[in-house]
Amino acid sequence: MNSIIDELSGGFAAVTPLIAATRLIAAVFLGGMIGIEREHRGKPAGLRTHMLISMAACLFIIVSQQLASMPFGASDALRVDPLRLIEAVTAGVAFLAAGIIFTSGNKVRNTTTGASMWLAGGIGLACGSGQMPLAAMATGIVLVVLMVLRQAERWMGTHDDN
C-alpha cells in the first residue's frame, strides 16, 4: 500500500502540483474564452473543444518537463527537445482543425474555427511552459480578431461568416 501512496504522491519532480494545477486551469480558462466566442457563433468546435485542446497542449508540456527531470540512464545521453513537442502538438491540433474545415458549393467553411483551435493549442503550450501572461495576451488579441474585426468586416461588406 505504501508503494501505491508513494507512486501517487511522488510524481511531481519538476513542476509542483500547485503550479501544474495553476497552469492547467489557466489553459482551460483561456481556451474556454475562445471557445465561448466560437460556441456563440454556432461553430462546430466550441467551448469544450477549445478547452480540451488548450488543456491537452498544456499537459503535454508539463509531462515533458516532468520526464526531463527523471533519470533515464546517463545524463549526457538524455536530450530534451521542446521544439519536437511543440511540433507534435501543433500537428495533432492541425489534424483536428482540418477535420472541421470543409467545402460546400465552391466555398471553404470553418477556416477561422480551425485557426482558433490551432491557436488554443498554442495557448495551452504557453500555459504549460509557465508563460501564462503571454497566453493571456494571445487570448485577448484573438478575441479582438474574432469579435471586433468581425464587425469591421460587416461594415466593409466583406464578412464571410467563417
Image (cartoon, rainbow, N blue to C red):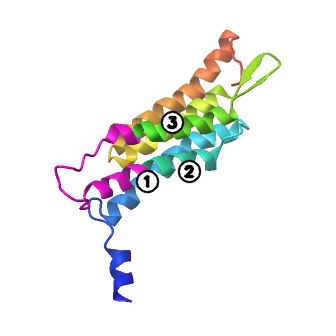
Residue under label 1? 59
**First in sequence: mark 2 vs mark 1:** 2
Q: What residue type is labelled 1?
A: Leu
Q: Residue 88's quadrant in the figure? A: top left
**In front: mark 1 or mark 3?**
3
Please indicate whether residue 119 sits to the left or right of residue 81 in the image: right
Question: Looking at the picture, does residue 158 appear above or below residue 61?
Answer: above
Q: Is mark 2 on a helix, strand or loop?
A: helix
Mark 1–mark 3 distance (CA, rounded to whole Å): 16 Å
Name the residue nearer the viewer: 159 or 148.
159
Sequence-wise, the earlier of marks 1 and 3 is 1
Locate residue 17, reporting x and y percent: 34, 65
Q: Is residue 8 left or right of residue 80?
A: right
Residue at position x 22%, y 59% in the image = 73
Which of label 3 and label 2 is nearer to you? 3
What span is in magenta?
Answer: 60-85
Q: Between marks 3 and 2, how big is the CA–CA gap? A: 16 Å
Distance between the alpha carbons at the discs numbered 2 and 1:
10 Å
Name the element at disc 1: helix
Asked if residue 158 is among those painted magenta in the image, a careful observer would answer: no
- Measuring from the top left, give residue 41's x and y in whole percent: 70, 35
In the image, what residue type sits under mark 2?
Leu
Name the residue: 50% across, 46% down: 54
Q: Which amino acid type is shown beneath numbered disc 3?
A: Ala
Residue that numbered label 3 is attached to: 91
Can you say whether 158 is above or below 31 in the image? above
Judging by the rendered image, the residue that carries numbered circle 2 is 52
Instruction: Assign the C terminus to one quadrant of the image.
Output: top right
Tell which of 44 and 33 is nearer to you.
44
